[in-house]
Amino acid sequence: MSQVSDVSLANQGFSAFRTELNNILGALNSMHSGTSRPSSATTGTMWLDTTNSGSNSLEIKFFDGSDDISVATIDTSANTINFLDSVVTGINIVTDTSPQLGGDLDTNSFNIKIDDAHFIADDDGNEQLIFQKTASAVNELEITNAATGNAPSLGASGETNVSLNLLPKGTGKIVVGTGAAAASLSSNGANDLVLETNAGTNSGNITITDGANGDINISTNGTGAIKFNDLALIPQQALTSSSNSVAWDTQAKPNAFHLTTENTTFAAPTNNVEGSFICLEINYDGSHTIAFNTVFEFAASTAPTFTSTDGKTDILVFRYNGSVWQEVGRTLNLSES
């Protein structure tokens, strides 16, 4: 303990003067260290509390005239200092090449500035997030967290209309999904989803329209064509009869087949789209008769004589003109095998 009762020199002989001066200088040199505030303390005195020195901890305190305010703690084992106030100004950390936080960093409504082409590193010192600067930038990324049941957002902010660029390097790709389940790409809200190139300049597009009966539109650019480099397959699906009638949703089953089990009439189809084509394969499992609703129009307005023979097949193709399904092709009396 190095404290004195006061730091004022009294008139005295040289020997006593020297002793008192040495005591005062010793107190100042040790920052008035002790387990309690020095009796010489006055408003503005800084002193060193050594109460916990046995556990390698010292505490710097400031006397404001009535109370001692803790300023910082010193770990004499780790050779570190921890300022206790949440707002400390004027501290130069440039000389500390590996500063560490003792708690969360609160920017206190200020910003963090990062030099161009510098980064946030992982705990091994490897680059994890690199920041690149654009002169006079006005647009930026905005990251928003979310409550339970909602998705966080990565968006663009700044001007009224701002695109968002995702830039792979070289021949790299933008990959979505977890790798453990199917990946989904969706518009935000009840809006169409458009896929295009070159930010929409000189580009065809694929548009998935929103809505209960939304279309998928494929549009070429200029004289471009829609090309299929492999077989364009519409899977064939079964139509079954009930009470001698077949119901046909032409949108869900444009390529259909029917295995007869009874004499059957094909009822007026549903979900018809003008300009669409449908194909029907009839396989006879017995000598069953076939008939069609009047919405089906055959060549010369006369239905063909269907095969109606066990083990045989008839194939018909129709096109919808907006009011009736017009026959555009037929092949009858084929062998099933």
Image: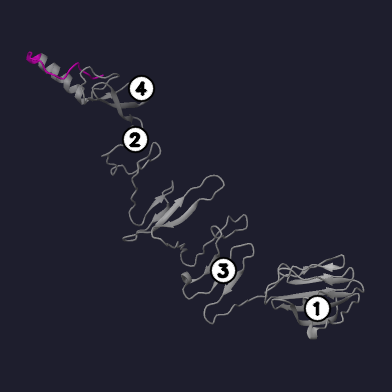
Q: Are marks 1 and 3 in contact (CB under 8 Å)?
A: no
Q: Main secondary structure of the magenta part?
A: loop
Quadrant of res 185 = bottom right
Quadrant of res 43 = top left
In what element is the residue under mark 1?
strand
Label 4 sits on residue: 54
Is 6 a magenta residue?
yes
**13 left or right of 73?**
left
Please state, as top left, top right, bottom left or bottom right, where the C terminus lies in the image.
Answer: bottom right
Q: Earlier in the sequence, mark 2 or mark 1?
A: 2
Q: CA distance from mark 3 to mark 2?
A: 54 Å
In what element is the residue under mark 4?
helix
Depicted 54 relative to depicted 105: above or below: above
Label 1 sits on residue: 315
Quadrant of res 148 = top right
Q: Nearer the viewer, mark 4 or mark 3?
A: 3
Q: Earlier in the sequence, mark 1 or mark 4?
A: 4
Amino acid tagged 3: Thr
Q: Earlier in the sequence, mark 4 or mark 3?
A: 4
**304 left or right of 91?**
right
Q: Are marks 4 and 2 in contact (CB under 8 Å)?
A: no
For the record, the magenta segment spans 1-15
Depicted 315 relative to depicted 10: above or below: below
Is 21 a magenta residue?
no
Amino acid tagged 4: Gly
Q: Earlier in the sequence, mark 4 or mark 2?
A: 4
Which label is found at residue 207? 3
Residue under the point 54% across and 68% down: 195
Q: Nearer the viewer, mark 1 or mark 4?
A: 1
